[in-house]
Image (cartoon, grey):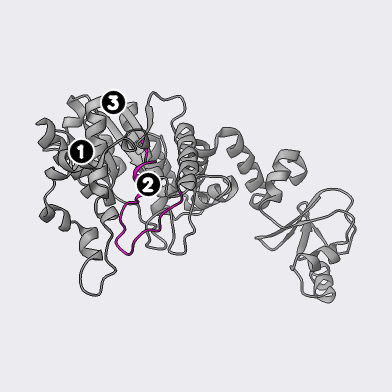
Amino acid sequence: MKLSEELKWRGYLNQTTFDDIKELDSKQFSLYLGTDPSGDSLHIGHLAVYMMVRRFLDHGHKVTLLIGGGTGQVGDPRDSEERELIPLDVINQNAESLAAQVKQLFGGQDFKAVNNLDWLQDVRLLDFLRDTGKHFSMGQLVDREHFKARVGKGKPGMSFAEFAYTLMQGYDFWYLHRNLGVNLQIGGSDQWGNILSGVDLIRKKEDVRVDGMTAPLVIDKTTGRKFGKSEAGEGVWLSPDKTSPYKFYQFWLNVGDEAAVDYLKLYTLLDKPQVDELESVMRADPGARLAQKTLAYEVTKLVHGKDKTDEVVRITGVLFGGEDFTKLDDIEVDLLAGEIPVAQTGGSLVGILLDVGVAKSNGEARRLVASGAISVNGVKVTEDQVFFEKSLVKKGKNTFILVR
């Protein structure tokens, strides 16, 4: 499948400066994707665009991945309000964390990683105003959607620093074009205005055409919010410290049927025949949830590696698939301990149910046991017992206690 066809099939195509998207099939491109270190981890909203870039690598194009250690000191303007400035030491730490995640995602691939702090910190103000600022008209800048959302009667306003952000990103594109031959910038659709700043700047300064294109922002079909972060600031992150590999896997495992097919295209390296086959199986036997299981495995493997993913799969099988808890090794038990309540051996079943809050009284705990509502290592129990070995206690379908 040609690159233009694959991008269309997977759902990546949105805005573009190309006259004909088939130019992607006949020309060699050197592209870049940038991410500011506003946090210490990428989330799955970022991941979709990184996977789009991966397609270019697979088709033989050159890729530069940029971490915005310089632009991150200002912050890309949001539609709602001014960003709080992040301390410089935090920006540097975040940049290191994002760089490590990018290398994990593109491990074994031929790409270049850069940090725009390396050149932006040396730019002199007067030179920037003369050589870059002079090429931007105020009419062009105030027509941007984020400006119109922030500036005007009853609106929160915008600092000059954020107003000038788009010039900085345009400068990045020009710098990478001059020094690395970059001729295409890719980003999410919220970056379209910033991408055009670079396209226009290079045309005016170098009399050369370069291009830009965006992927649509992925919307969570359940919540209707932008994929990756919720309004409360929670989200599905690539860092295991923010979203554990188990929770990461469970997120993908629990998506709906329609979303599963879309996400297989966006977030995995599976080709069209493989995705079509999974969709066919899903239509014939939706209860098997093979599309979701494949999606969860492939994306978790990409982000956290095969070994960690296999551990998560075994834990999931024990919790929800009836597999033998006693077959888990110590590493897998440690991983499970981070996801469910833990009680110490030496306690009674009734006492443990009370201690972890499964029952509110000794009487309720005894009734649960006597009624057969509790199982230990997959076997229903009807009498109290004392635990001397590690065990998995289960109530109903989704309440678990690890005794160790």
Residue 57 image-quadrant placement: top left
Residue at image location 49% in from the left, 47% down from the top:
90
Q: Circle 1 — which element?
A: helix
* Other residues around mark 3 within 10 Å, as few (<14) / some (14–19) / many (≥20): some
Query: Which range is magenta?
Result: 66-87
Label located before the other in sequence (1 or 3): 3
Residue 311 on the magenta span: no
| Mark 2 vs 1: CB contact within 8 A | no
Residue at image location 70% in from the left, 41% down from the top:
332
Q: CA distance from mark 2 to mark 1?
A: 21 Å
Label located before the other in sequence (3 or 2): 3
Between 281 and 268, which is closer to the camera in this rendering?
268
Mark 1 or 3: the one toward you: 1
Does 286 sit left or right of 127 as displayed?
Answer: right
Give the total number of marks visible in the rendering.
Answer: 3
> In the rendered image, which residue does mark 2 sit on?
72
Mark 3 or 2: the one toward you: 2
Across and down, in percent, residue 209 comes to 12, 32
* Mark drawn on residue 208: none
Does 120 sit left or right of 274 as displayed?
Answer: left
> In the rendered image, which residue does mark 3 sit on?
61
Quadrant (top left, top right, bottom left, bottom right) of the N terminus? top left
Name the kind of residue labelled 2 in the image: Gly
> In the rendered image, which residue does mark 1 sit on?
127
Using the image, determine if residue 46 lies above or below residue 232: above
Q: CA distance from mark 3 to mark 2?
A: 27 Å
Residue 281 image-quadrant placement: top left
Name the kind of residue labelled 3 in the image: His
Using the image, determine if residue 54 lies above or below residue 264: above
